[in-house]
Image: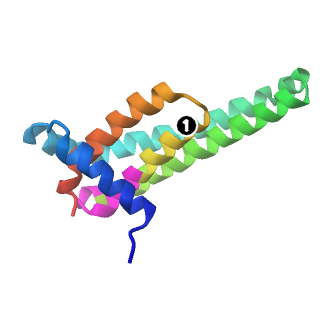
């Protein structure tokens, strides 16, 4: 049976970022694994709070967006709604990853990977290619460097 596109992406990224890329020293990898539940907690809380903040600020300024005309208002409403949803989803995924990360289970790593993919997709939709390339590659590099520690 053929592998799913997500499995193919994971295998390709693991090949290039986990095996062929320069390896982090083992002590740094172990430190990242040990602190990963705390990093997921911080990212999750900040993600959820950011989502609520973006939604709240966007709601406050919504009446002013109408002065820009219907085209501007439509893009404004969709952008802040979309941003707050994606921030919330990545925050919740990070929070869901805490318990499996403590147990060093692959499920925790997968949740972090999905959150990273959603983060990258949100910046792709906004055409922020610098953030996609630099931030996305750095995040994925660290994720795939520690992947073997999660079984």
Q: Taking 101 as reference, is 142 above or below it?
A: above
In the rendered view, tell whether residue 1 sits above or below residue 36: below
The span picked out in magenta is: 101-113
Q: How is the image coloured?
A: rainbow
Drawn side of residue 133 relative to residue 103, left or right:
right
Q: Position of residue 100 (x, y in %)?
A: 31, 61
Q: Quadrant of the C terminus?
A: bottom left
Q: Residue at x 85, y 23 (%)?
A: 64
| Vertical relation: 93 (above or below) 81 | below
Local crowd size for mark 1, using a 10 Å CA cut-off: few (<14), some (14–19), many (≥20): some
Viewer-side residue, 68 vs 134: 134
Image quarter of residue 81 = top right
| Location of mark 1 (residue) | 124
Q: Nearer the viewer, residue 57 or 105?
A: 105
Q: Give how far across and how far down residue 2 sits, in percent.
A: 39, 72
In-image side of 62 versus 50 (left or right): right
**148 horizontally vs 11: left or right:** left
Secondary-structure class at tag 1: helix
Residue 40 in magenta stretch = no
Residue at image position (27%, 40%) is 142
Classified by dominant secondary structure, the portion drawn in magenta counts as helix
Q: Residue at x 42, y 59 (%)?
A: 6
Q: Quadrant of the N terminus?
A: bottom left
Question: Percent position (x, y) of residue 78?
Answer: 74, 39
């Amino acid at each position: 049976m053929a592998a799913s596109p997500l499995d193919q992406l994971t295998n390709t990224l693991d090949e290039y970022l986990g095996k062929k890329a320069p390896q982090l020293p083992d002590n740094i990898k172990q430190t990242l694994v040990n602190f990963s539940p705390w990093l997921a907690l911080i990212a999750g809380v900040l993600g959820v709070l950011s989502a609520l903040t973006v939604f709240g600020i966007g709601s406050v300024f919504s009446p002013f967006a109408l002065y820009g005309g219907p085209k501007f208002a439509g893009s404004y409403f969709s952008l802040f709604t979309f941003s707050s949803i994606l921030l919330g989803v990545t925050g919740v995924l990070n929070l869901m990853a805490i318990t499996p990360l403590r147990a060093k289970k692959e499920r925790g790593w997968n949740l972090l990977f999905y959150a990273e993919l959603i983060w990258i997709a949100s910046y792709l939709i906004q055409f922020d290619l610098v953030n996609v390339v630099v931030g996305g590659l750095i995040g994925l590099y660290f994720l795939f460097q520690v992947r073997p520690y999660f079984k």
